[in-house]
Every structure is written in structure tokens, then in C-alpha cells.
Amino acid sequence: MKWEWSPSRRGLLKSAGAISSVITALTGASSASLFAAAKWGGSKKSIYQQLGVRPLINAAGTYTALSASLLPPSVVQAMAEASRYHVPIAELQAAVGKRIADMTGAEHALVTAGAAAALTLATAACVAGKDPERIRRIPDITGMKNQVILQKTHRVGYDHAIRNVGVRLVEVETRAQLENAINSQTAMMFFLNYSDPKGQVKRREFVEIAKKANIPTLLDAAADVPPKGRLQEYVKMGFDLVAFSGGKGLRGPQCSGLLLGRRELVEAAYLNGSPHSDSIGRGSKVGKEEIVGLWKAVEYYLQKDHQAEWREWESRVNYIAAQLADIPGLKTEKFVPEIANESPHLRVTWSEEKIPLKNSQVAELLRKGEPRIEVRPSEAKQPVLEIAVWMLSPGEHKLVASAVKQVLNRGRC
């Protein structure tokens, strides 16, 4: 059979009725009833229905573009309570910073408007410190230290948040280059955590070099929880500042981030941001609801049963793999991404001779189906589908298994 990608064939594959019938057969309930119960909240028109925006089942992960994670009920409750009162932001940040610092072993902590905002504030802290005149002048950093050193393999789009401060990024590759790059204009050394395997200078060596030269270090660990030990590990390792996303594995508000580290630098980061009007971080405002929400999210995260959660994730992966096992030409394997998004995932590969579908075609069919499903993005040339299960709500792994099976079976020759 020759595969031809045409509008009519595409329409057949993404038929909501066809996918729903398979889901009904395999789960005992329709996709509409299961998904509605979880997402739409009964017969009353939901907030997303009012807007005409279709929710999705997140089998991709904590991607910002897919609204990251879902808030635990205790976090929602805390944010709702916080919203009912006025409070001085300075006092709230100080109090929450102390609570989070006590839980993580850091000297101090600051809730920011996302991990990218944490990078900007951390850089500003290293450049301008607590000097009011310097804080007002950023990104004009004339007369201030203006260089940030990082490994070439650690360049990423998110370092725009660092460049916002007006600094120049100095790229190096070897230890010798790193040591030679340090000079009187070096304000900070930056390390992108998930790129550690790619660079020649590893974390501990990086910190050692910086300490010897008395240069502050910033670690971007935005998506690097779980495991929970990461919240303590990097500060103990010696990084002066560590940035995490609040809305990913911590399951706090999506527009929140966490900056941990040395008290003096964290306090300087606060002065370089909201609510201070004439500062580089004024636009990255974090509200009382997000500050309280992230505090409660960190508390919830550190107290929950992580072993039980891991077993649940593995059971979801095993279920999906079992449902796909009888498709000819298809193979499945469990894997755990290194560093970022460290949780059980499923990788599905297939023979294009038996299932002539490209990765992008399968992803698009799942996206257009009912329910709407997003899987991990892939640029691989070979046929592969990667499924994350840790952002799924209870029971959604069955819907994912049914929809993937339906799409791949209909694509068979």
C-alpha cells in the first residue's frame, strides 16, 4: 500500500467519532464523558468553552506553551485566600523567602515571575548589587562589570534574560579558556544545568574555578525538578544563585519562579525587580497570589510521597506500552530524560514500511482529535513518538493509549 497524505485521508484519520469509538471499547467510557468529567466541570459552560479554547491532555511535559503543570488543590486554596487581602509585598517576599530558604537549605530565597525573570534579576544583582543609582541605570552598565562567562555548549535562547541587563556573553570551551577569560570585568559565571553533559567543564569544577577567582555563579535549573533533592543539591555544591521554574515540576503558579542562594545576592535581586519602579525587573511583577502559591507548592512538593508518585508514573507507561504491543512493526521502550523532566516516559517507534506516518503527522492527528492530545515535540528523522505521563490527570493515560493506537492502526498499510 502506498501512503498518500491528502485532506480526505487526513480527515478520516482525525475523525473524532472513530477515535471515540475505540476509546469506548477499550476503557468502557466515551472520550467525551471521561475528558468532560476531568476538564469541563459538568453541564455548566466552562471558562474555556466560553472563550472557544479547547483544553488538551498533556502527554508532552511542562512546556510553557502548553501551560506547564496543574496546581494541586492546596495551592489553589492558598492562592484564593491570599487574593482576599492586601499585604505589603516587601514583608511578604521576606517572610516567604525565609520559609522556602529553611525548606531548601539556602541562605535566602526569592519568588520571581518565572525562571527567566530569576535569571535577569540574578544577573542584575551581580552587576549592580544594591546600589540604587546603578540599579536605575541598567541596562546602561557603563563603569560596571559587564561580562558573563559561560560555556559555548550552554548557549540557549533563554540567556536573552541575562543579556537584558546589558552584559556581554563570553563563550569558552575548555578549563584553560575559562580561567583565562576571567578578568576585572567579569560580573558572573553562568551554567545551564541540563547542558552539563555537553560541556567540558562540569558543575563542581565550574564552581571551584569561580570560587578561586571570587566570581559569583548562577545555575539555571529551571526544569530540573524532580528529583526533590535538586532543590538542595546545587546550593550545597557551592553555586551562589540557583534558578528554578515554579510552574513545572514544583506545580506552582506557571508565572512563578524561584531564586535560591546567598542572602546578599538574593536581596540585591529583589531590589532590581518589582515592586521597585525604576528597575530592570519592574516588568516581571509577581503578585501576592503567586508568592503564596509557590511557597505552598514547594511545601507540598517536599512533603509528598515521591516513591508512590514514581510507581504511578511507571504504571501509566506500562499501560500505554501494553495497549500498543499488538501493532505490527511497532516497538516501545521506557526511558527517563537526563537531568530535565526526570520521570518515566515512553518512546514509541515504528516501521515506515508498515506504518507510513511521519512524526509530525502523528502528532498533528493527536492534536486535532477528540480529546486533544499533545506529545513531546520531536525533530528526529526516524519514526518516533515520545509520551510523557507525569503531567497527566488520573485516567488520562487510558485516553492517550487509545488515541495513539487508533492513529497508528489507521495509518497501517
Image (cartoon, grey):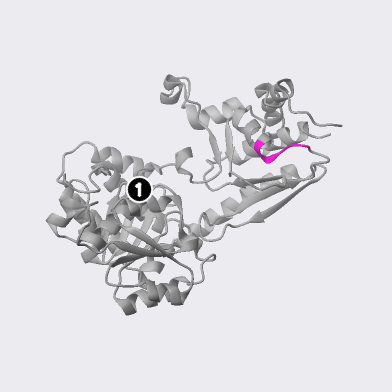
Extent of the magenta region:
356-360
Left or right, 305 with reference to 213: right
Image coordinates of residue 364 in percent, x first then y, are 63, 33
Left or right, 329 with reference to 290: right
* Quadrant in the picture for residue 239: bottom left
Image coordinates of residue 321 in percent, x first then y, are 70, 47
For image coordinates 41% across by 47% down, the residue present is 251
- Pointer 1 residue: 114
Please tell me how crowded label 1 is: few (under 14), some (14-19), or many (20+) other residues with Cα within 10 Å: many
Q: Residue furthest front?
A: 142
- Taking the image as drawn, is residue 78 in sight? yes
Figure quadrant of the N terminus: top right
The overriding secondary structure of the stretch rendered in magenta is: loop
Is residue 54 or residue 364 the one in the foreground? 364
Left or right, 408 with reference to 183: right
Is residue 250 or residue 28 the one in the foreground? 250
Q: Given the image, on which type of amino acid does mark 1 rest? A: Gly
Q: Residue furthest right?
A: 1
For image coordinates 48% across by 27% down, the residue present is 40
Count of residue discs: 1
Is residue 62 or residue 158 the one in the foreground? 158
